[in-house]
Amino acid sequence: MREITYLEAVREAMSQEMRQNEDVFILGEDIGVYGGAFGVTRGMIEEFGPERVRNTPISEAAIAGAAVGSALTGMRPILELQFSDFITIAMDQIVNQAAKIRYMYGGKGKIPMVVRTPSGSGTGAAAQHSQSLEAWLAHIPGLKVIQPSTAYDAKGLLKSAMDDNNPVIFYEHKLLYRTIADVPEELYCIPLGQADVKREGTDVTVVATAVMVHRALEAAEELAKEGISVEVVDPRTLVPLDTETIINSVKKTGRVVVVHEAVKRGGYGGEIASMIAESEAFDYLDAPIKRLGGALSPVPYNPELEKAHAPQVNDIILATKQAMNKA
């Protein structure tokens, strides 16, 4: 199987879907000739033209409103927001319109739209361009929330998102765009709500999302040298959440660390931890649930402070040892 980058996998999924479904189009700021803020749509306007790769004014509210309206009339829009922080400007259209219309009209109206947006820190983009706000969107009934950690997952989950008749928030971590994985050339679906065990283990479960999956895997390699066997579970989708895979892993290991980049307070790790505590897995726990998240501050611009803001490999190693009572 050929290897491609995460960025190429996202572009390929959209291009292949657009070739087979004329109702699919993309809209966003500078996505045409420029190819988007991170180059994801580069070259697509040459194939599909400006009607289907539509540059928009610099207004996230207008982009989201146009997407909602076009979805209601039968189109299947993919809107690109340059940075996930800017979703705050489109919250009324996404939260009060897209998420609720199908429910309020008894299923007669549907909103098959995908909100693609780069998230996370690590690029020196500072406080207004580096946030991880997925827990905010996961709180809203009617929205589905996806966080792929690999190129393979990105392509398969984006296909499922494009097929869905509900609004989907599709987070693409900036640090993952250049990562490489084996990806089939043909279109394929990864069902929403299906977690993936990225590494089998017997001593501790680490539930990690997005870029933290890679840091958890690196930590697991280091811990294996000390005889600690770590199982890494990637939920892949926060909404819907695959509770069964997480519960079964915790029942097997008896210990769990939940790690995400978003600020720890109010982060989605609290939802995962409470789900475990309320399930049959609670009786199998041999240690308290450990949670890792970002520091309670805006994301710093200074590279060393930015790195200290988010959990790193050594933080995951320490939390895992604490769960094992070996720290």
Image (cartoon, grey):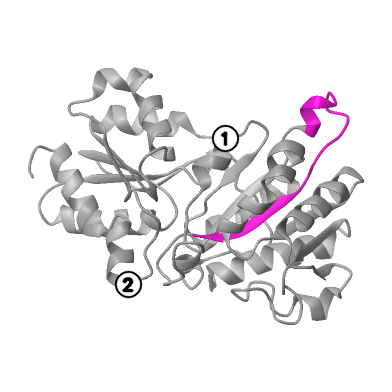
Q: Nearer the viewer, mark 1 or mark 2?
A: 2
User: Could you tell whether 314 is left or right of 134 in the image?
Assistant: left
How crowded pointer 1 is (Cα within 10 Å; few <14, some 14-19, many 20+) is rated as some
Q: Splitting the image into 4 quarters, where does residue 92 fall?
A: top right
Residue on which disc 2 sits: 303
Residue for point 58% across, 43% down:
145
Q: Is residue 225 left or right of residue 191?
A: left
Magenta stretch, residue numbers: 101-119
> Does residue 38 appear anywhere in the picture?
yes
- Asked whether residue 185 is in view, the answer is no
Residue 308 percent across, percent down from the top left? 27, 61
- Kind of residue indicated by mark 2: Pro
Q: Answer yes or no: do the residues labelled 1 and 2 have beta carbons within 8 Å? A: no
> Pointer 1: what residue?
240
**Front position in the image: 293 or 157:** 293
Q: Amino acid at mark 1?
A: Pro
Q: At numbered mark 2, what does the secondary structure look like: helix, strand or loop?
A: helix
**Between 194 and 26, which is closer to the camera in this rendering?**
26
Above or below: residue 76 compared with residue 305: above
State the residue at coordinates (45%, 54%). 210
Q: Nearer the viewer, residue 278 or 18?
A: 278
Residue 310 on the magenta span:
no
Q: Earlier in the sequence, mark 1 or mark 2?
A: 1
Q: Is residue 76 above or below residue 141?
A: below
Viewed as shown, does residue 126 lie left or right of 288? right
